Amino acid sequence: MSKFDPYEHLSVSLNQDGSLTRYIHLPNSTATGETAQPGQSVVSKDVTLNADKKTWMRIYRPNKLPSNDSAVARLPIILYFHPGGWIQMSIADTIIHEQSNRISGEVPAILVAVEFRLAPESRLPAQYEDAMDAIVWVRNQAADGANGDPWIREYGDFSRCYLYGTSCGANIAFNAALRMPELKLQPLKVAGTILNQPFFGGKQRTKSELKLATDEYFPLPVHDLLWELALPLGTDRDHRYCNPFVDGPMKDKVKHLGRCLVIGFGGDPLIDRQQTFVHMLVQQGVRVEARFDDVGFHGIDMIDPRRATAIRNFIKEFV
């Protein structure tokens, strides 16, 4: 029996300088630009976040804006952090772009998808810093008055900002939410955090990890490699970025999290950690809505349109 190679499973190889060669290149989609073409329900545009860090954002807004008494109703602002195990994927990937389009159109919301730096070229906490840059950027559009981005300024509701992430993106959304009290964000108010199949770990294995160790999509050696590539050098899987249950001061910060929606699936090796995470939030007095389905695996919403629709409906109800 051949030895399982997590690099091969992920279609990447590690270079001598510590960077990765990525062999899979998914189809890309460009932003629509500011003018909708016939049949387009959502328009999108790209904005630079930090040129030095090569970070940027794609902003989506519904083409037809809801109105109250002839005045345009302001829409919630959702900051979105994509999946990809820290090391892969982009908001320009067609699969991510289409999901972002649908969320913006169906919720409806102004959706700001964040192109954060990837590991191992940029290790944690770089991704959390990029998330904070994006949150501050959105805040600045309100503070800058006439100079702010018109989509955010004219159509966004600054009192209803949400952080939304999937898999590693959910880990980013959670860690960004914990850092929020350190910033002066007025008039921006984060009204909730949405964690879709959050990616956490730890040295001690859980029952679901052991039971699903050879999972077809997300086997245990792949979890371990992703953390090895993403965590700061010299740390292990009990670092607070990976394992939120081991750090006392972090638990104190959790109290300020605000409303939280956590989504998970029974066939995900991470399900035990996600459920323990929900218990921790509840113990800290956080208002949590947990949506766990016995059937389904990690990343099911990327390939099953029905599950993707169900998750969008959860988000719509929560927002």
Image (cartoon, helix red, strand yellow):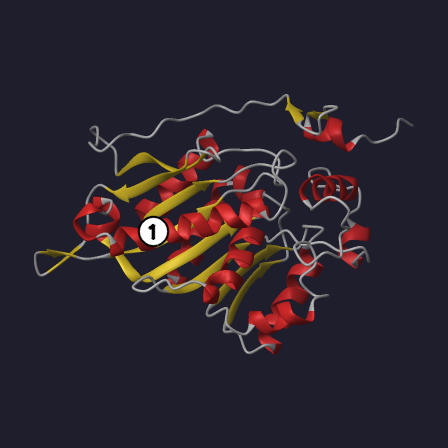
Q: Find residue 12 and report its image quarter.
A: top right
Picture coordinates of residue 289, whole percent (x, y): 51, 68
Residue placed at 64% from the left, 57% from the top? 294
Picture coordinates of residue 265, whole percent (x, y): 62, 54
- Quadrant for the N terminus in the image: top right
Q: Is residue 278 above or below residue 141?
A: below
Closest to the observer, 8 or 19: 19
Q: Find residue 8 and report its image quarter.
A: top right
Residue placed at 51% from the left, 49% from the top? 129
Dot 1 amino acid type: Val
- Quadrant for the C terminus in the image: bottom left
* Residue 42 seen: yes
Q: Is residue 211 above or below residue 10?
A: below
How crowded is the residue under tag 1: few (<14 C-alpha within 10 Å), some, or many (20+)?
many
Please, what secondary structure does the residue beneath circle 1 have?
A: helix
Residue sticking out furthest to the left: 70
Picture coordinates of residue 167, whole percent (x, y): 58, 48
63 horizontally vs 22: left or right:
left
Disc 1: which residue: 138
Picture coordinates of residue 120, whole percent (x, y): 66, 36
Closest to the observer, 50 or 63: 50
Residue placed at 50% from the left, 33% from the top? 90
